[in-house]
Image (cartoon, rainbow, N blue to C red):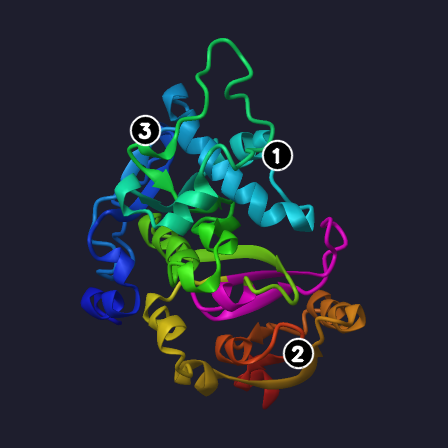
Amino acid sequence: MMKFESLCEKVPWIESGDIRPYVFVRPENQIQNPGARHRTNWFPHAPVLKNPLDVKQIHFADQIYAIEERAFGPSNMAMPRWVFYDCAVMPGFVAGFAAKPKALSAACRKVLDPSLMKATGSAVGKTSHLPALQSIDEMDWVPLSLFIIIPTMHKGEWVAHNLCSVNSLLPKEEQLHGLGFLSKAFGLWYANVEQCSGMTQWGSPALKLHSHYGWLEVIGSYAPVHSHRQTITYRAEVKVDLWEKFFLKEQDLGFLENYGPSSFEIDPKQEDSMVRLQKEIEADKGPFYLSAHEIAQKKLDEKLTIYQPKSALNS
């Protein structure tokens, strides 16, 4: 796997330690032996630990809320505060990267300025017992991204609930390359996650990230239970040796050795293609997979090949 020194060549902002991982977790949920399962030296800096049950951390939380609201608000998928607290903070934790104020670029400062941002339903400044939202320079660390991960009843499996970063608010030339990808990678590594499941929408740019953490199995291609029924539900066994391919844009030869194209495709513009594959999944005709390299090479609205184990294709 790519060494930290090589990663720094691709992602220079990660080297100094002025931008480093954070973990927003209540004490009871802290991970035992963090980072023990997966071997990588990508995260040498000690993470910033924040307790969401500590009222003094409301400013840190509000910056997280504000990024998330602006990232998902346009698609009507912004997360209510109670969902964040009840469904994320209490059972799981939030990870990401945070910066010392002095490390923020002028463009980043502008989009994170509390006077220009509105955190969803913020209680800050609306009651007598909470202070007004702090300015960036009054904070010790300023969150730049968030990755919510929640353990499930299935031993070893966690659900990736939410992932976004300040990059979605910045012009391309001002973005921190790899910020979103590394936010999820850090969370998976830190929590010793064996299997990660998650949901995203067909045609979403998020699929280009989520497909690189392990071979991506499609366990649901259509989700009428979801508010956006054109949703893919996926799972993957975490494979850290694949992570460098996100930056190197290399083909995964191991995937090609084990999986081949099936007769199915998903057209992000055609719901019928999702329904057809869903019927195959429900009939136990799988497993079905997506190719990370193909997703990376194609435009968001192009058709995607569905792969199956070669043993199943040859039987």
Residue at the disc numbered 3: 138
Q: Quick one: quadrant of the N terminus?
A: bottom left
Residue at the disc numbered 2: 302
- Find numbered disc 1 in the image and state the secondary structure of the residue it sits on: loop
Q: Residue at x 52, y 81 (%)?
A: 297
Horizontal and vertical percent position of residue 95:
39, 44
Instruction: Report the amino acid beneath label 2.
Output: Glu
Q: Nearer the viewer, residue 20 or 40?
A: 20
Give the mark nearest the N terminus, 3 or 2.
3
Q: Residue at x 44, y 87 (%)?
A: 257
Horizontal and vertical percent position of residue 239:
37, 66
Q: Residues within 10 Å of mark 1 (few under 14, many from 20)?
A: few
Q: Please give the label number shown on residue 118.
A: none
Q: Residues within 10 Å of mark 3 (few under 14, many from 20)?
A: few
- Find numbered disc 3 in the image and state the secondary structure of the residue it sits on: helix
Give the mark nearest the N terminus, 1 or 2.
1
Q: Quadrant of residue 99?
A: top left
